[in-house]
């Protein structure tokens, strides 16, 4: 009995030779498993940038150099005849009004008188030159005639300059000198939009215009963008109720406007089209004109240390793919670097949190 108890005690103490107690094996080191696609985020395929604008900017149509004109009086004048009314089509050179300008009448009279004296002095000079050749004219007489001729020419030139201010020339001087009216003519083809002068009204020179004309010239649009534009970008004009109008860029300001941080650019329609001056719309920068740009959900982006990434699904889970963010528009982002065959996590943050890597 004592022998059985002793053997049992030795077995408990592990002292019996060849009867070592089993050793516990250390737990196997856990191997990290590759991440597997999770239901925490849907998976989407990047789509082409067709129909998604890179950016937009308000735009307006600038008047053409031949598309607008105002006609007034440079000298004091009274209206003697109104020849047009609003809405009337006029051609360049069409008479809009007739006015009487006292200063122009005086200048025309001086020009006529100076012209007559100049002709008389010119004939006198020719006679004296012929007599001098025969030794029958004194040098002082010839000098006096030449002086008088020069004075007449100077006075005629001064009078002609004042007539030019009134829009007249030497051919008009005779009619104006007789008290005739001065015609005010249209400088452009277009439509009369305003007539403010009435019969008998007197206007001071340089005052409000008497007639306004709007013409149809080549349309030029100006837009101001808050961000730099890619060199290869394409543009279109968006007007309410009309299909987009393709535009061609004709100029871009070399520097940013310090007042608001925008950059001005100018465009014309690719297909010639008359647009009314002052028309407003929006110039849209087409993203589909940029190479390698696709659209992904904005939540698909991971921004870490200044680098943007998306999570691309693989056979074993997913991988991080660096991308370049070209622009964001609401819930979508335009990126470069995501392949057309890739499938990316719609919500990258949610996927990382579900996988415990956040």
Image (spheres, grey):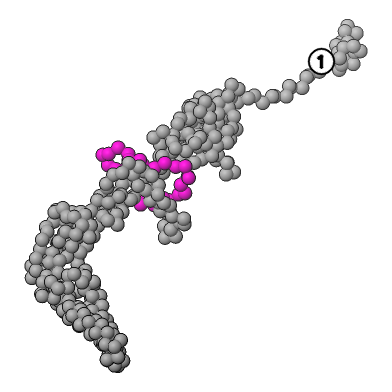
The residue that appears at 23% across and 79% down in the rendered structure is 156
Say which quadrant the C terminus sits in. top right
In this picture, is 18 found above or below 343?
above
Magenta residue check for 232: yes
Residue 234, x across and y down, in percent: 42, 41
**Residue found at the very far top of the displayed protein:** 1
Instruction: Name which quarter of the figure residue 128 lies in.
Output: bottom left
Report the span colored magenta.
222-246
Give the mark count: 1
User: Which one is in front, 279 or 201?
Assistant: 201
The residue that appears at 60% across and 26% down in the rendered structure is 35
Instruction: Name which quarter of the figure residue 283 lies in.
Output: top left
Q: Label 1, secondary structure: give it.
A: loop
User: Which one is in front, 168 or 277?
Assistant: 168
User: Which one is in front, 189 or 72?
Assistant: 189
- From the viewer's perspective, tell me whether residue 338 is left or right of residue 26: left
Residue 256, x across and y down, in percent: 45, 56
Q: What residue would you read off at disc 1? A: 22
The residue that appears at 43% across and 52% down in the rendered structure is 252
Label 1 CA crowd tier, 10 Å (few <14, some 14–19, many 20+): few
Residue 207, x across and y down, in percent: 20, 71
- From the viewer's perspective, tell me whether residue 48 is left or right of residue 106: right
Magenta residue check for 144: no
């Amino acid at each position: 009995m004592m022998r059985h108890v002793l053997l049992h005690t030795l077995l408990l103490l592990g002292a019996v030779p060849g009867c070592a107690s089993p050793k516990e094996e250390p737990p196997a080191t856990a191997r990290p498993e590759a991440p597997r696609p999770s239901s925490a985020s849907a998976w989407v395929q990047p789509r082409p940038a067709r129909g998604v604008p890179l950016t937009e900017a308000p735009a307006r149509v600038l008047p053409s150099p031949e598309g607008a004109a105002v006609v007034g009086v440079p000298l004091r004048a009274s209206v003697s005849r109104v020849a047009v009314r609003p809405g009337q089509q006029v051609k360049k050179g069409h008479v809009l009004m007739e006015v009487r300008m006292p200063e122009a009448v005086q200048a025309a009279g001086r020009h006529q008188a100076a012209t007559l004296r100049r002709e008389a002095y010119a004939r006198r000079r020719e006679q004296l030159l012929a007599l001098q050749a025969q030794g029958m004219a004194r040098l002082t007489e010839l000098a006096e005639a030449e002086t008088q001729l020069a004075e007449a020419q100077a006075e005629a030139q001064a009078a002609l300059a004042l007539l030019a201010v009134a829009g007249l020339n030497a051919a008009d001087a005779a009619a104006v000198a007789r008290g005739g009216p001065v015609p005010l003519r249209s400088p452009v083809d277009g439509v009369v939009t305003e007539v403010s002068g009435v019969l008998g009204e007197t206007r001071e020179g340089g005052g409000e215009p008497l007639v306004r004309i709007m013409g149809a010239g080549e349309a030029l649009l100006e837009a101001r963008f808050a961000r730099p534009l890619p060199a290869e970008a394409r543009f279109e004009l968006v007007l309410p109720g009309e299909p987009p109008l393709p535009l061609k860029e004709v100029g871009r300001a070399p520097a940013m406007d310090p007042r608001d941080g925008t950059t001005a650019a100018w465009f014309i329609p690719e297909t010639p089209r008359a647009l009314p001056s002052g028309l407003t719309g929006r110039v849209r920068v087409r993203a589909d004109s940029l190479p390698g740009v696709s659209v992904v959900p904005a939540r698909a982006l991971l921004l870490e240390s200044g680098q943007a990434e998306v999570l691309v699904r693989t056979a074993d889970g997913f991988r991080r793919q660096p991308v370049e963010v070209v622009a964001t528009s609401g819930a979508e982002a335009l990126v470069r670097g995501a392949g057309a065959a890739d499938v990316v996590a719609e919500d990258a943050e949610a996927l990382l949190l579900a996988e415990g890597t956040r």
